[in-house]
Image (cartoon, rainbow, N blue to C red):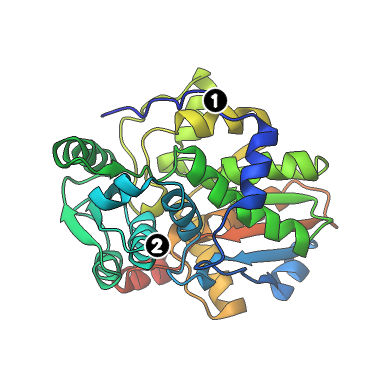
Amino acid sequence: MTETLKQASSPEPLDYLRRILLAPIYDLAVETELTTLHKVSARLNNQIYLKREDQQPVHSFKLRGAYNKLNSLTEEQCIHGVIAASAGNHAQGLALAANKLGIKATIVMPKTTPDIKVDNVRRFGGEVRLVGNSFNEAQTASVEYAKAENKTLIHPFDDVDIIAGQGTVAKELLQQLPNADVVFIPVGGGGLLAGMAVYLKQLSPRTKIIGVEAEDSACLKAALAAGKPVDLEQVGLFADGVAVKRIGENTFDIIKHCCDEVITVSTDEICASIKDIFEQTRVIAEPAGALSLAGLQKYTETSKGGESLAAILSGANMNFHSLRYVSERC
């Protein structure tokens, strides 16, 4: 695997705050709703909210970081085009953002990527190259392509501008729910958790921040145990949006200081949360999208109750053929 190098002079928290507040994303991204889950709230004896990133034009939060990053490129970089590796949602966000700005985008995707995500990347104008069976294999290939073709590599999570763009989710959430007691955020490479955590810890330090990982892709838990990012031997592919073997260097620097706790959840718990989200909103969340609600429900098993809890529905690009599996596991 090609490791991502830590960006020189990584920003301080105050600089991240400034970058998030000034991120020029709303030419393309939208401010998403915060939906109250009334039935789940009554069942769990807490006030439960869902931040609806499924409402973005690409049905995922990834558009925020991608558009913010492309807005930071030089004219020369835009002329040569950009390239990225992605399991799907970053690919769609980058393809649409590049299309909006008139930049050629090439996306390297694992062969295991759901068809719906591959088709959408092409529909948004991106060139797709299917390489390898995991994100890490696709990432290695994208680095090689970038050097050979003089393209700018857009990392899906371990980049200062990507992190700041994802942090705008927290800006909206804090405006919508100023009294949040606990916020649950899904973790793959850590871009969303890092961006949201660095914002929330500065403006709402009383709010507890919990990262949620799939048990078979728990790269953050492994990094915290080792004191640094480490490679997992393998990752599960059910929650393909968070199927990352190694947490980012830049994201981990932020998370280890700003995240209060990490919860891991099983495939069955994720499936149960997909069902809850569907019954409350009629939205079919992808497994990674339902991850944080699964973590929230696990948290309430030992919490005191009566709290204001928010989960991030990070994406809804579900492969149709996976629905039967989800239904059976529920």
Is residue 290 shown above or below 134?
A: below
Counting from the top left corner in percent of width and height, residue 156 is at 39, 46
Pointer 2: residues within 10 angstroms few (<14), some, or many (20+)? many
Name the residue beneath numbered marker 1. 224
Secondary structure category for the residue under label 1: helix
Amino acid type of the residue that numbered disc 1 sits on in the rendered structure: Leu
The label number, if any, that marks residue 47 in the structure image: none
Horizontally, is 186 left or right of 148 in the view? Answer: right
Residue 311 appears in view: yes
Amino acid type of the residue that numbered disc 2 sits on in the rendered structure: Ala
Name the residue beneath numbered marker 2. 97
Q: Which residue lies furthest to the top in this view?
A: 227
Q: Which residue is drawn at 53% across and 64% down?
A: 272
- From the viewer's side, name the closer residue of 19 and 255: 19
Q: Which residue is drawn at 38% across and 63% down?
A: 101
Counting from the top left corner in percent of width and height, residue 209 is at 69, 43
Screen quadrant of the N terminus: top left
Estimate the spatial distance between the alpha carbons at disc 2 and disc 1, rounded to whole Å.
33 Å
Counting from the top left corner in percent of width and height, residue 254 is at 60, 31
Secondary structure category for the residue under label 2: helix
